[in-house]
Amino acid sequence: MLIDALTLQLGYNATLVAIGAALLGIAAGAAGTFLFLRKRALVSDAISHSTLPGVGLAFLVMAAFGGDGRHLAGLMLGAALTAGAGLLCMHWLTRHTRLAEDAAIGAVLSVFFGFGVVLLTVIQTVSIGRPAGLADFLLGATAGMLFGDAVLIAVAGALAVLAVWALRRPMTLVAFDAGFAAASGIDVRRVDLAMMGLVMAVTIIGLKVVGLVLIVALLIIPPVAARFWSDRSDRVLGIAGVFGGLSGFIGAAISATAPSLPTGPIIVLTAFVLFTLSMLFAPGRGLLVGWLRHRRQQRRIHLRQGLLAIAQDLPIYERYTLNLLVKAGLARPDGVATELGRLRATKACRDESRWAVARRMHSHEATVSRYDGLRPIEAVLTGDEIREIDRQLAEDEEGCA
């Protein structure tokens, strides 16, 4: 059944929901990248929790006028209004009081979410409209979603992706260096507002699918995972979009096969799996690659120290160093160097003397500053430079002890 869901063969509504969730994930991953780079990830938490009173108020208004209180477009409009109010409150608190941004976020988040919980509780106790399903906005649910709701989420997700693509350049510049962006003529305040507006739009679109409690995870986890794969912002943006899209699509597909499970947590857990794989196996910053790089560097250092010890007829006490020399055919198990080991040791010792001379020569100052003590001197200096150093070495009558 999961294969049917992943290949979009589980019905028209399930297909639309999966596509909509994928588009939502792409938009969330891309928009979240700018929040992550701007170091304002917690703002999305305040925005998402501020939507709950809007859902309750929109339900009451639509039900009071005799309409269907659960109309998704109306609920999203109400959520957008209170999310905007929460954003303005947070902005006012940080600009006109001495509260730091994290304190303002905590105040807005808790007050708006508390108000929303009270409204939902009141709605459940009074006989107005049909409130069943409103609680799904907390954790997300796609089971029972109407065709019109799925179309609305898919279209809104596509528009959010287009908006992210159109605004990616100024938002990237502001996220990295707001001062340089301002000096370049970019209105940083407007770009910040556009960034927050985009995050708010993604949050509103994702309320039904992911839920307001967990939408922040879909905004933050994909860019954090993408950061393991690249140092370039455009690539991080693209990878975050791909990870977000995969999380939304796979999570919605799994949820379609198990309607009793909330959609939001499944999407977030899928994103977490991608994050874990990135953290372990990413070629640039992954933990496994980092550990292998450390082991390789450690092996090179021990080999170098072992060769220098052989060159100076010193005993090798470190067992790991001796094992490496034996494995490389440079020494016997009793610590006596082989012919190849003595040749390599003489070369290593001579290179150390060359570097000692190079450090005194101003013409090689820049090169020497980049030398890590392990690379062969031929990989760093040219043949002419090495011959010049050898001449200086002969004049000084210096050599390896």
Image (tube, helix red, strand yellow):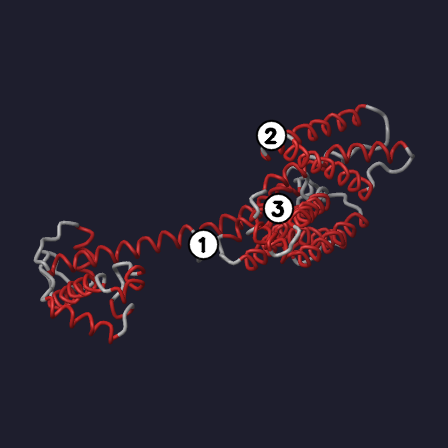
Q: Which residue is mark 3?
A: 219
Q: Position of residue 303 (x, y in %)?
A: 21, 58
Q: Is the residue 204 above or below the residue 246 in the image?
A: above
Residue 330 shown left or right of residue 206 in the figure: left
The residue sitting at 60% across, 35% down in the picture is 101
How many neighbours does mark 2 have within 10 angstroms: few (below 14), some (14-19), or many (20 or more)?
Answer: few
Q: Amino acid at mark 3?
A: Leu
Q: Position of residue 181 (x, y in %)?
A: 60, 53
Q: 206 or 93: nearer the eye?
A: 93
The residue sitting at 56% across, 44% down in the picture is 39
How many neighbours does mark 3 have within 10 angstroms: few (below 14), some (14-19), or many (20 or more)?
Answer: many
How many neighbours does mark 1 have within 10 angstroms: few (below 14), some (14-19), or many (20 or more)?
Answer: some
The residue sitting at 59% across, 39% down in the picture is 42
Q: Is residue 253 visible?
A: no
Which of the two labelled residues, at mark 1 and mark 2, occupies the earlier sequence position?
2
Q: Which mark is residue 281?
A: 1
Which of the two labelled residues, at mark 2 and mark 3, occupies the earlier sequence position?
2
Q: Which mark is residue 98?
A: 2
Q: 3 or 166: nearer the eye?
A: 166
Q: Amino acid at mark 2?
A: Arg
Q: Nearer the viewer, mark 3 or mark 1?
A: 3
- Label 3 to label 1, Cα distance in Å? 22 Å
Q: Quadrant of residue 162?
A: bottom right
Secondary structure state at the residue bearing disc 1: helix
- Label 2 to label 3, Cα distance in Å? 28 Å
| Callouts 3 and 1 close, C-beta under 8 Å | no
Q: Is the residue 362 above or below the residue 206 in the image?
A: below
Secondary structure state at the residue bearing disc 3: helix
